[in-house]
Structure formats: structure tokens, C-alpha cells
Image (cartoon, rainbow, N blue to C red):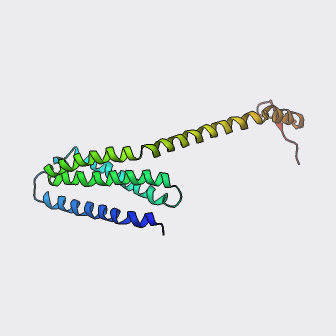
Amino acid sequence: MNNNLLANLPSQRADQFLITVLTSLIQVKYQFEEVSAFEKHNIIIPILIVALIMYGISWAIEVKLRANHLNYQTIAGSISLLSSSLVIVMLMLMLVPYFGWLLLASWAILLIWVSWKSYKEMHQLLLEAFNGLKKLILDIRHQILEQPNQFPLVASELAHNSISIVDEGMGSEVAALPPP
């Protein structure tokens, strides 16, 4: 098993545990209130849902790329870290607003730090993607220019080997290939 997998597993389990516990506490907090959490926090809930979806997708990408693409895995891990921590911050913001705002400010600092740390990797990946796209376009262009225009060849062979058949309904000639 990969050492990085073992190193990252406890933090993912901790994130999942915290999200589960905080979600349960929100259910308890809003159990007897007249206003639901969705109505009271109509700005936080969409952010929470988007962050949760990003966390799930980035975690799946990180696990999928764990064995073969270290650079992509690092970026997916960073996105997973940011999105899972944002989910936790949004849940805390719903439970304890003052502490949640403090955590949101801390999350903003984490966002800046992770972005700064992964800038070189992102720049390198964008250069690789651009060079790969450029190579692909040049290869396609080279293949198109190397191949002779085959349409006139096919049309001339079809005209040379065709048998003229008169269509009874229209009275026009139809080209057909000779029988084998």
C-alpha cells in the first residue's frame, strides 16, 4: 500500500467524522425551532452544498490518481483539504456563528497558503497541458497534410467501375458497384 495513502487516511476520516457529528448537532439544534436551517441560513447552505460536492469529487479524484500521477494527486488533495475544511467551517458557522466567523477567517488564510504553496505545481501542470494540446494539434495537422486527398480517387474509381442503372420510378441514372 502507498505510504501517502496511509498518511492521508486519518485526516480524511477525521473530516468525515466531524462533518457527520456537526450535521447531527445541526439537526438537534433546529429540531424544535419554527424556522428550519435551510430557511435561516439561505446563503450558507448553497455554499455548504457546493463545498461538499467539491470535497466528494476531489477526494474521488485523489484516490483514483493516487498510484500514477503525483502532481495531480497533490492538487486534488489540496482541493479536498480546502473543500472539506470549508464544509466544517460552514457547519460551525451555522452552529456557533461567532466561532464560525473566526474559523472562516482562518480558512481564508489556509486558502491563501495552499494557493501559494501549489502555485508552481499548477503552473507546471498548465504548461504541460498547453504543450500537450499544442503537440496534439500539430500531429493532427501533420496527418492531414500527409494524407493525399482521397475523395477524387474514390469518386473516379466509383465512376470507372460503376454500372449505369436506370431507376424505374425517377428515370435517372444511379451508379452502382459491379457484383463481386
Give the tally of numbered discs. Answer: 0
In the image, 27: left or right of 76? left
The extreme bottom residue here reads: 1
Depth check: give the residue in front, 175 or 36. 36
Instruction: Work out whether 174 lies above or below 114.
Output: above
Depth check: give the residue in front, 150 or 118. 118
| Image location of residue 83, percent across then percent down | 33, 51
- Which residue lies at the image location 88% right of the left edge and 43% below the top edge? 178
The extreme left residue here reads: 33
| Image location of residue 160, percent across then percent down | 89, 34
Instruction: Work out whether 24 lies above or below 147.
Output: below
- Which residue lies at the image location 16% right of the left edge and 55% below the top edge? 95
In the image, 133: left or right of 85? right
Depth check: give the residue in front, 124 or 93. 124
Residue 37 visible from this viewpoint:
no
Instruction: Work out whether 6 lies above or below 155.
Output: below
Depth check: give the residue in front, 27 or 70. 70
Residue 17 visible from this viewpoint:
yes
In the image, 166: left or right of 25? right
| Image location of residue 59, percent across then percent down | 40, 57
| Image location of residue 115, percent across then percent down | 37, 44
- Which residue lies at the image location 37% right of the left edge and 54% below the top edge? 80
